[in-house]
Amino acid sequence: METHNRLLFFIWIIMLFISINCFSYNVEGRFHYHKKQKSVQDVDIEIGVFPSPAYAPTSPDEPSPDDPGDNSSNSSSDPCIFNVMSYGAVGDGTTNDRDAFVAAWKDACDVESGVVLVPSGYVFSITSTIFSGPCKPGFVFQVDGVLMPPDGPDCWPKSDSARQWLVFYRVDGMTFTGSGTVEGNGQQWWELPCKPHRGPNGTTLPGPCDSPALIRFFMSSNVMVGDLTIQNSPQFHMIFQGCNGVRIERLSILSPALSPNTDGIHISDSNSVGIYNSLISNGDDCISIGPGSTDIDIQNVTCGPSHGISIGSLGVHNSQACVSNITVRDSVIRNSDNGVRIKTWQGGMGSVTNINFENIEMENVRNCIIIDQYYCFTKGCHNQTSAVFVNGVSYKNIKGTYDVRSPPIHFACSDSVACTNITLSEVELFPSLGEMVDEPFCWNAYGNLETLTIPPIGCLQEGEPQSISESMTTGCS
């Protein structure tokens, strides 16, 4: 009897062991075939919340979107990712892959949370392209490789516009991101003889001199751009025109200090734009804010070498320009021709109002603080009576060093339309090398000093001018 019981116990143990193994196998099988995929659907794309630049696999055996493999657009493992390699892109840096990009865009645009993937490990060349929306919600254009235009004007197709390369038109809720690089191949464009100081003996030759802006968002809303490196544009690196609700974050924009007209980010006719935590080093303005711009917030930007952060130029060809509610704060400008600048042409109309520059560090900057209402490309500009009205400009906690070739503070306001309500607080600027230059320059500028400044400012007039009637008819709402 005891032997029989031991035998039954032994058989029970064996059956229990087999059951455990079978259970473990079945659990593993269910996990393998029914696991939740990590896709863009899992990413919050509300404005102000930035998605991760790469969509990592949830387990070691899950395919990576960076690996083109057999990665067809209707793959069950990644239903939202549309890899341009699956549409015939070669990625050898020479072949024109435009058709593959257009096809991937079309398919991704037609589904929710669609991702156009430009994979790492490849160099893609495409000709000038307009990517049009609207797209379904959650659309992402993800560049993890290198994306570039044809190399210079000689390789640029004659049938393509020479003024723009990538255009994103009427997109709403799009994210433009990735761990890759948008390479502009600008060197040959910069050397055209009609570019500033590129002609014989430092002159500029006349003639057509169109050069393409690298990336342009036009009439788009709720756009997020981040984490990319954008470099060596033939002209402006990024343009936002007619846009509403833009967040730009963690960008690196790079081109040589002598590359002409290579503004980093240009904004016009747009509102509610934020630029954060970015590095911009180029041959023109790091950030330029054009007419029709309002509610622009710039924070934690490192700028330079460059021409600084500029509002303008405004009022060219006697045009109207309205700019308001601009804040630049917690930023660094170094080795630049200008610091924070407002520049307008004589003869313009409109206004620049409610401008705040706060907590800005200057390092060897020429013209650290400047309002120039006599902006002109040549010495042949004529005096005109009308001007853009500049009112309500605040400079607070602006500190650092300046290049002694120019006064660190320069307020050159219109003869007929004074600048008003300029306030300065905690402004301390010292020469980076040499002796302190002459005192700051002011012309027809009104405002007040909330604290003592270094260098001392004795030229700013108190109160308001006797007549600002012309200033008040700006035409701006």
Image: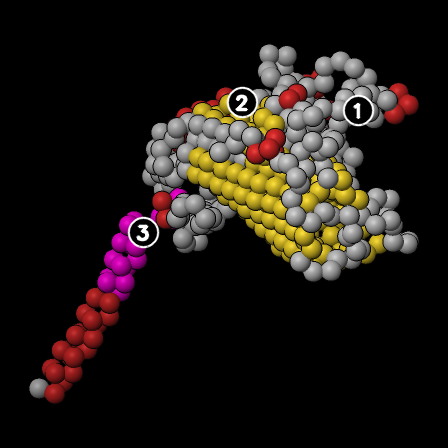
Instruction: Give the Cα separation between the discs numbered 2 and 1.
Output: 35 Å
* Mark 2 neighbour density, 10 Å: few (under 14) some (14–19) many (20 or more): some
Q: At 74% from the left edge and 42% from the top edge, which residue is drawn? A: 411
The residues colored magenta run 21-40
The residue singled out by tag 3 in the image is 35
- Type of the residue with mark 2: Thr
* Residue type highlighted by circle 1: Thr
Q: Residue at x 87, y 49 (%)?
A: 438
> Which one is closest to the eye, mark 3 or mark 2?
2
- Residue 300 placement (x, y as % from top left): 61, 52
Query: Total marks drawn?
Result: 3
Kindly report the secondary structure that dominates the magenta region of the rendered protein: helix
- Amino acid type, callout 3: Lys
Q: Secondary structure at mark 1?
A: loop
> Which residue is painted at 60% across and 48% down in the image?
356
Per the model, the C-alpha gap separating discs 3 and 1 is 66 Å
Neighbor class of circle 1 (other Cα within 10 Å; few <14, some 14-19, many 20+) is few
